[in-house]
Image: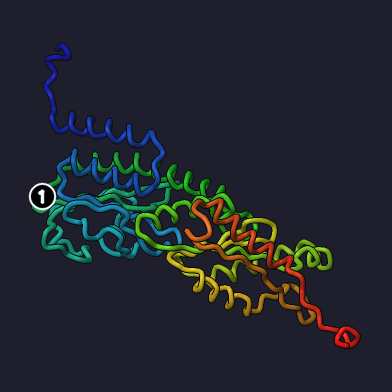
């Protein structure tokens, strides 16, 4: 029988076309949110599934799954967290096996029944024999999925697992390149990149923003007297203090040896000065000293967009200029008796 005489299988052909489309997506490294959005769109458009969802283990809380992507009937669940050991997702995570549910309303393993969803298929995402997430699809009718649908979803899950691992590795390498190795704060390049983004946002929305540059007074002497190990411990301590003192929307960075930067979106100069005043009253002392340790003082410079600069470089330069002016400002001496005469 010639090839043209072989009967066509629409469902099989559709699956091959769908996998071909996904393959083109997976050959490009996408940020994880973009990758998830693309896969959700492809699943929804190419398979005819009424709903799709992707749940991934939270890297900081391994007891929960984050629903990173959702479409159709499950679109409202995006961003939610669910226990990793509950419901049908918990069954798949524990067994690491695909699952086909013909009637979710009558299955006792369903934790939360949805009046719009009657059937579903589930496939695990497995890395090194460990389940790291669940890809699922749903339809409004009973017995709406076949074993072929489950096989297709399982193949997609295998491809998707590899793409997610690549995206996470790429993001981790990017974070390493943007992070100071000692303090784990953002580095100077990352600080300038974020500053550029915030300036662009400020132009669009009419918001101001402020940059603060901080410097440890006498850090060189501390290194000479107490050693570089103590100096490094002090830098880490300062970094932790700054991180605890700013909002989640702010950014703390290490800009140089003992120079730190704060990026404060939607903040004017007077509010930044209040933050600096609080920082100057904190007990930042030299770590690892057996005797009472002297407190470390801070010098600072503050620059506000757009009054003090229009570009990331000019704004940071202005803040550093004010910092250096403060550090080199002559101290006022108490007049002697002779001079008072």
- Picture quarter containing residue 275? bottom right
Residue 210 x, y percent position in the rendering? 50, 64
Foreground residue among 138 and 43:
43
Foreground residue among 37 and 130:
37
- Residue 259 visible in the picture: yes
Residue neighbourhood size for the residue with mark 1, other residues' Cα within 10 Å, grouped as few (<14), some (14–19), many (≥20): some
Q: Secondary structure at mark 1?
A: loop
Residue 138 x, y percent position in the rendering? 17, 51
Residue 72 x, y percent position in the rendering? 17, 52
Foreground residue among 65 and 100:
65
Residue in view at x 39 percent, y 57 percent: 57
Instruction: Give the answer, above or below, for where 65 lies relative to 283.
Output: above
Residue in view at x 62 percent, y 62 percent: 260
Residue in view at x 13 percent, y 30 percent: 10
Instruction: Give the answer, above or below, for where 138 lies relative to 26.
Output: below
Residue tagged 1: 143
Residue 334 x, y percent position in the rendering? 81, 83
């Amino acid at each position: 029988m010639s090839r043209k005489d072989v009967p066509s299988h629409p469902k099989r052909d559709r699956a091959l076309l769908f996998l071909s489309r996904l393959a083109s997506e997976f050959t490009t490294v996408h940020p994880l949110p973009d990758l998830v959005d693309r896969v959700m769109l492809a699943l929804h458009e190419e398979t005819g599934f009424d709903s799709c969802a992707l749940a991934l283990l939270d890297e900081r809380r391994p007891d929960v799954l984050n629903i990173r992507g959702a479409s159709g009937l499950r679109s409202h669940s995006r961003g939610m967290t669910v226990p990793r050991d509950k419901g049908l997702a918990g069954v798949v995570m524990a067994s690491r096996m695909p699952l086909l549910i013909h009637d979710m309303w009558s299955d006792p393993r369903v934790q939360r029944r949805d009046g719009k969803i009657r059937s579903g298929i589930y496939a695990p995402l497995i890395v090194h024999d460990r389940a790291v997430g669940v890809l699922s699809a749903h339809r409004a009718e009973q017995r709406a999925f076949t074993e072929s649908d489950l096989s297709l979803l399982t193949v997609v899950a295998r491809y998707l697992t590899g793409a997610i691992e690549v995206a996470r590795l790429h993001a981790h390498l990017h974070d390493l390149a943007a992070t100071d190795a000692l303090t784990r704060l953002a580095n100077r390049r990352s600080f300038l990149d974020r500053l550029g983004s915030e300036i662009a946002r400020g132009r669009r929305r009419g918001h101001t923003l402020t940059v603060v540059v901080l410097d440890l007074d006498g850090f060189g002497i501390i290194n000479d007297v107490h050693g570089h190990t103590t100096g490094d411990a002090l830098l880490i301590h300062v970094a932790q203090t700054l991180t605890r003192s700013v909002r989640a929307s702010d950014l703390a960075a290490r800009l140089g040896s003992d120079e730190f930067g704060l990026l404060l979106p939607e903040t004017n100069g007077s509010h930044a000065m209040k933050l600096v005043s609080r920082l100057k009253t904190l007990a930042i002392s030299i770590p690892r000293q057996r005797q009472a340790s002297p407190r470390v003082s801070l010098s600072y410079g503050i620059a506000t967009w757009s009054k003090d600069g229009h570009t990331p470089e000019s704004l940071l330069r202005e803040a550093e200029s004010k910092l250096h002016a403060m550090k080199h400002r002559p101290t006022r001496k108490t007049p002697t008796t002779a001079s008072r005469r």
